[in-house]
Image: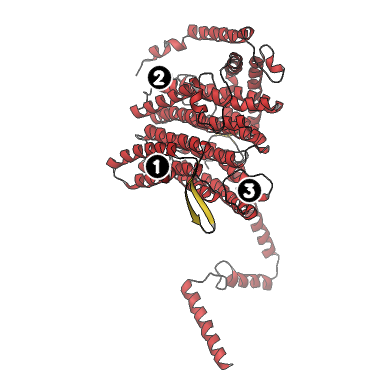
Amino acid sequence: MKSKESKNIHWLVRSSTIKLLWILMFLILGIVVLLQFFGHIHGHFIIDETFGFNAWYGFIACVIMVFISKFLALFVKRKDNYYDD
Amino acid sequence: MINFIPPGIILIIAGFLLLIVPKQLFRIIAFVAPIITIFIVLQIPDGVSLKGNFLDYSIEIIEGDKLSRLFGLIFSIMALGGTIFSINNIKNKELGFAFIYAGSAIGVTFSGDLISMFVFWEIMAIGSTMVIWNGLELTSHKAGLRYALVHFLGGVILMIGIIGNINQTGSSNFTAVSLDSWAQWLMLIGILINAGAWPISSWIGDAYPEASAGGMVFLSAFTTKTAVFVLIKTFPGTEILVYIGLIMIFYGIIYALLENDMRRILAYSIVNQVGFMVTGIGIGTEMAINGAASHAFAHIIYKALLLMSAGSVLYMTGKRKCTDLGGLYRTMPITTICGIIGALAISSFPLTSGFISKSMISQSAADLHLTYVWFLLTAASAGVFLHAGIKFPWFVFFQKDSGLRPKDPPFNMKISMIIFSAICILIGIFPSVLYSLLPFEVDYVPYTFGHVIAYLQLLLFAGLAFFILLPQMKRTLTISLDTDWLFRVVSLRIINFFSKELKILSDGIKGGTPEQISSFIDHLIKYHGPSGILAKTLPTGRTIFWVIVIFVLFLILTFLS
């Protein structure tokens, strides 16, 4: 059993590490988009060849899906002992 | 000679032996039987190599082609992998039934006619139900019963369809049929129920997570993928499958996003992944069928890997809800890394097996210029990373510190995870190995600079969306109602309503009627009611007595006349 102190200082959950991870993530995201300057994405529908299409399309698709699920939750969400009795 | 032993029968016999043999023999059979099966599957030649007759129909128990060998191979690899993972944590009986289940799935893949296919199909339903019934808790009994109801209903529908089809076409051949009579529609419905197609898809999320850690590893592989195999054989290029597949894809994503139970997240994601395959079968070109078949192969491996990882967490902590888990990366590094590899593979990250299989399905949609289908598949690919690729590892291994400090699981469970992780990556790096097993010649290069960049953009920005929306995704102690609510709750309410209302009605009628009428009704009930002497079903002895009396009377009357 680890003490509470040593739990708090695990390197992965330090706030400095988390900040660094966010910076690293944005850096990678930037690189992945900029790489499109060095190579052609072969598309089939015109728009999918445009600059950064997959980036914004993926992002927006996910946002929409999360909000659809939140909307659906208004109707279908129940406590997890709903069927028990 | 070896070609004449049906590989599925070997596992089924081994399964029955596992139910009864003593402990010393148990492990030997559990490991040797799947290895022999893998070996035999690879030897099966093209064409029919074992047949017999049943009534007027010829029964082809072994008919091989590339497609059946591909599915037979992955099913037998799965039987071996599942055994390695679960040998220390599964009940003897449970593994026995899992082998019967796996063997019958292999039996379906090598069936050359619809009758033997259907027999194996039904054995599969029995085997899988028994695996669920041997699960962890009391809830698995009820869930198993619901599972059995759905599958036997599906089985009856399929059987009516097959009989109708044989009547109409005069052939029991297990080949492609066109969807132009009621019998073929019933066949399609029966198969789709096993594939987990909406609206009868809730059984996957309902029943599978009630099985044990090892049990669910087995369950995830066979039923739905056997249905995919049968769909490829019978309904390739059937347009309606494109739409059914797309509904399954988004149903899986949305329900997985709402889910709190870690293995139920993965169960919904089975529906999502099978949706990709069903869409591919609906598109029906050689590229699409190759995509569906290879995706089934790749999916079985990485889904089993994900469930081994989740199963290890369940085995070590006894907990299954995301709200109870979190921060396990500290003490379960191997389980975490293997879980992440499975999550990357299901998300089709470059250098994993999902990348080289799923992209063939999208490519086939693009080749035919199916605009909406392609855009929806692309959005769904981002959604897979969202609901399974990040959500599962994040909420189980990272998220918050739950205070749990479990160790990595025992040796055999670790080894099985490492082997399956390696297969995910090896297929991703050397796609030609899998491509050479596919039913059609592959003319597709997954690794082009543009394709890799496009996928990385899509997936990494989906990841960004996840972390930005994290507050929206907070786990709660909830479940989501599904279509099974209709028969679990609404049907009961209707029955209760009518029994209550009818009672009031009958009381009212009784109260308002004159004495003579109600005594007449009582008289009727006395003699003709449920326990009335004139309505009772008679015991056999008494029936025979009266039959003899009538017979004797008949004889006497005959003599007299």
Q: Is residue B247 left or right of residue B555?
A: right
Q: Give the percent coordinates (x, y) of residue B256.
A: 57, 29
Give coordinates of residue A14: x percent, y percent.
46, 9
Circle 2 is placed at which residue position?
Answer: B333
Would you name the residue on which mark 1 appears?
B94
Give SS at disc 2: helix
CA distance for labels 1 and 2? 29 Å
Q: Nearer the viewer, residue B141 or B43?
A: B43
Amino acid at pointer 2: Pro
Q: Position of residue B238 (x, y in %)?
A: 66, 38
**Residue ID at (40%, 24%):** B418
- Which residue is depicted at the point 55% across and 7% down? A23
Instruction: Tell if the residue under mark 2 belongs to the same chain as the one under mark 3.
Output: yes
Q: Helix or strand or loop: what does disc 3 sit on?
A: helix
**Side of B137 where B519 appears, left or right:** right
Residue A74 image-quadrant placement: top right
Which mark is in front, 2 or 3? 3
Q: Quadrant of residue B376?
A: top right
Q: Which residue is mark 3?
A: B186
